[in-house]
Image: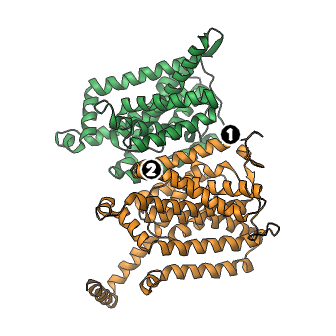
Chain colours: A orange, B green
């Protein structure tokens, strides 16, 4: 890792450090109930992070990120029941989901399916999972020892220490695992978008034709980032079914697919911390809305989505950054320094 | 022989059903390049119109054939004026905004009518028989009305002034507008008509499926896959997509079970898009409507 990469990742490390502090401080301050709730929110934040990567940086408008999330959760649950331990189950969840995403992505990217169609296809895949797994309620639908359970879903075995299937983790410990996974994924994605691979992906997002004329196989890069994103989403799914204790087909619903998109829109495309923050904010908003019956959740989310698309299309984080930058521009001392930096860049 | 007739009838019904739920979406997509993610909710609103109207004592045929398209068409025009017209040319944003609209409508209807099934309407026609097999007469009615609806849309596009202007706008909006066509108005009317057709479809299907605020989600995936596989030609595309995907769905449902019918539909669509990224009408029948 050279020094310029480290400099670019300065804010990433800052937020990661903040996350570590939160990880150790939260259980001392908060109640167990809040911690368990937080675990679910963290799992969703991992999902948001994966979409922030492939949509915000890869420019791939995937409406079905929850499909990978849910698939990861189902694969984890089914393999954990069959293997009697979570070590291989976690690996299976990530690998199977990535393989599925790679196969789907092959058809999409090598078919040169454009943006909007891609969104619709991935959404359709999600909805097909939804209607498919809902129907698996009979005793004949089982994989190994795991009944799929249709609408009621399957209860997920808790995660255990690696290679030791007897030592289950309690909910308060799962919180540490979840937080650690979120921080590691965040740093990993923050690193990935600053590597050459990540930069090519951004170049493709900006102008696919130009990137292709420069000699990059855009299909391969898109497929790569799509598959990595799906793997991260699967990890989120594993955390999610651990936090909730079971996995149901509802995870594939249109509502959840929309929610994922809303996190990234609200947080801002092209940032990583924005969508993560938006996930936590909206998670607590919808929890609060669940406590009353006047305003329907769908109604509020629909209004939020429309308002952001029409009025704040960039999302919160980039808007705030722009605002700060424009404030800075007005102060002359900073402006001089900026001019200096620009001259340096031109050399 | 009876069996063949019964299966053939079922197949025709599956195809007609798919064509019926997709047509409104195809009109809006083909004409305006707007992917309307609230399409399922337009169908749902059509269904609710029928249920509310029949509960209020309106004749069920009037409710289905006149009120449902009228009400949803008006809603469509309002939506176009308030939301869609700010977003022309920004396909992704339109997609997101209509998704927001879809959530909003689901939330609104849930708040008004509750989350469970409202009183349903029973299919108003009797039974038809193929020897030892029987089928619902209402299914036959749906097949016939789908054909009639396609014919009507074809007549409108091909022979009316509105159809001519709409086709011109679809081919080259800038040229049309410099020739004095108010493309803005054409878009508004098209969106309204597309919504009206969706409302009609939703109203017609309400007796078969019942109505729920979330019922749109069950339609939308199938409708999208059909329209996108069909390509941009409105009628030929939807027809070709419905026949291919509906046919596969019907055959697989009959042979392996209805769950696999839907999987077959999806897989066929994905493979099809790999081979023909612009849909069936992107390769064949290019000049068709």
Q: Is residue A291 something one can see in this rendering?
A: no
Among the two numbered marks 2 and 1 on one chain, the one whose residue lies closer to the N terminus = 2
> Above or below — where is B246 with respect to A285?
above
Image location of residue A110, percent across then percent down: 41, 51
Chain letter belonging to callout 2? A
Left or right of B7, for residue A169:
right
Most extreme residue toward the right is: A166
Relative image position of residue B231 (x, y in whole percent)? 38, 38
Position of B84 compared to B117: left or right? left
Q: Is residue B92 visible?
A: yes
Chain under label 1? Answer: A
Answer whether labels 2 and 1 touch (C-beta < 8 Å): no
Instruction: Look at mark 1 in the image and give the residue it sits on.
Output: A135
Numbered badge on residue A108? 2
Q: Are marks 2 and 1 on the same chain?
A: yes
The reply, left or right, for residue B107 in relation to residue B101 is right
The one nearer the camera, B237 or B285, is B285
């Amino acid at each position: 890792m050279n020094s310029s990469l480290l400099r670019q990742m300065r804010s990433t490390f800052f937020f990661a450090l903040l996350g570590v502090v939160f990880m150790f401080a939260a259980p001392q301050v908060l109640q167990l109930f809040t911690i368990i709730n937080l675990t679910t929110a963290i799992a969703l934040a991992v999902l948001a992070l994966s979409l922030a990567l492939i949509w915000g940086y890869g420019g791939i408008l995937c409406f079905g990120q929850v499909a990978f999330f849910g698939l990861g959760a189902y694969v984890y649950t089914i393999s954990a029941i069959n293997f009697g331990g979570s070590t291989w189950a976690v690996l299976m969840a990530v690998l199977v989901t990535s393989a599925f995403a790679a196969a789907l992505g092959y058809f999409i990217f090598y078919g040169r399916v454009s943006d909007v169609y891609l969104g619709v296809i991935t959404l359709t895949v999600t909805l097909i999972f939804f209607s498919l797994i809902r129907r698996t309620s009979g005793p004949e639908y089982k994989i190994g020892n795991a009944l799929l359970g249709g609408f009621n879903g399957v209860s997920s075995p808790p995660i255990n220490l690696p290679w030791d299937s007897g030592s289950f983790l309690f909910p308060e410990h799962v919180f540490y695992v979840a937080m650690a996974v979120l921080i590691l994924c965040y740093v990993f994605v923050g690193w990935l978008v600053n590597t050459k691979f990540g930069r090519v992906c951004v170049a493709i997002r900006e102008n696919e034709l130009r990137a292709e004329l420069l000699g990059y196989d855009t299909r391969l890069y898109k497929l790569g980032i799509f598959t990595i994103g799906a793997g991260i989403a699967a990890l989120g799914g594993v955390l999610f079914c651990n936090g909730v204790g079971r996995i149901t087909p509802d995870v594939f619903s249109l509502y959840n697919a929309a929610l994922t998109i809303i996190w990234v829109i609200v947080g801002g495309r092209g940032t990583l911390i924005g969508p993560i923050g938006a996930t936590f904010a909206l998670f607590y908003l919808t929890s609060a809305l669940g406590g009353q019956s006047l305003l329907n959740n769908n109604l509020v989310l629909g209004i939020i989505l429309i308002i952001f698309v029409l009025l704040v299309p960039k999302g919160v984080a980039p808007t705030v950054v722009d605002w700060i930058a424009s404030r800075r521009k007005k102060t002359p001392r900073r402006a001089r320094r900026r001019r200096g930096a620009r001259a340096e860049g031109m050399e | 022989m009876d069996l063949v007739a019964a299966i053939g009838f079922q197949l025709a019904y599956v195809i007609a059903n798919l064509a019926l739920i997709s047509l409104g979406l195809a009109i809006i997509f083909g004409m305006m390049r707007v992917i309307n993610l609230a399409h399922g909710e337009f169908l749902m609103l059509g269904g609710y119109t029928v249920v509310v109207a029949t509960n209020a004592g309106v004749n069920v045929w009037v409710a289905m054939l006149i009120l449902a398209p009228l009400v949803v068409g008006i809603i469509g025009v309002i939506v176009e004026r308030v939301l869609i017209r700010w977003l022309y040319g920004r396909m992704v944003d339109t997609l997101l905004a209509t998704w927001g609209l879809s959530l909003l409508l689901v939330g609104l209807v849930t708040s008004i009518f509750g989350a469970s099934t409202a009183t349903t309407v029973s299919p108003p026609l009797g039974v038809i028989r193929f020897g030892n097999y029987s089928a619902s007469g209402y299914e036959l009615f749906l097949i016939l009305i789908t054909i009639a609806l396609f014919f009507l849309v074809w007549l409108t596009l091909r022979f009316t002034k509105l159809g001519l202007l709409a086709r011109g706008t679809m081919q080259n909006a800038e040229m049309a507008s410099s020739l004095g066509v108010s493309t803005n108005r054409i878009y508004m009317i098209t969106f309204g008509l597309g919504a009206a057709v969706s409302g009609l479809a939703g109203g017609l299907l309400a007796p078969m499926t019942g109505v729920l605020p979330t019922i749109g989600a069950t339609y939308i995936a199938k409708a999208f896959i059909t329209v996108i596989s069909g390509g941009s030609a409105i009628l030929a595309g939807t027809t070709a997509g419905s026949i291919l995907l509906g046919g596969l769905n019907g055959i697989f449902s009959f042979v392996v079970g209805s769950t696999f019918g839907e999987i077959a539909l999806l897989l066929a669509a994905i493979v099809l898009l790999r081979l023909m990224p612009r849909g069936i009408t992107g390769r064949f029948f290019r000049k068709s409507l």
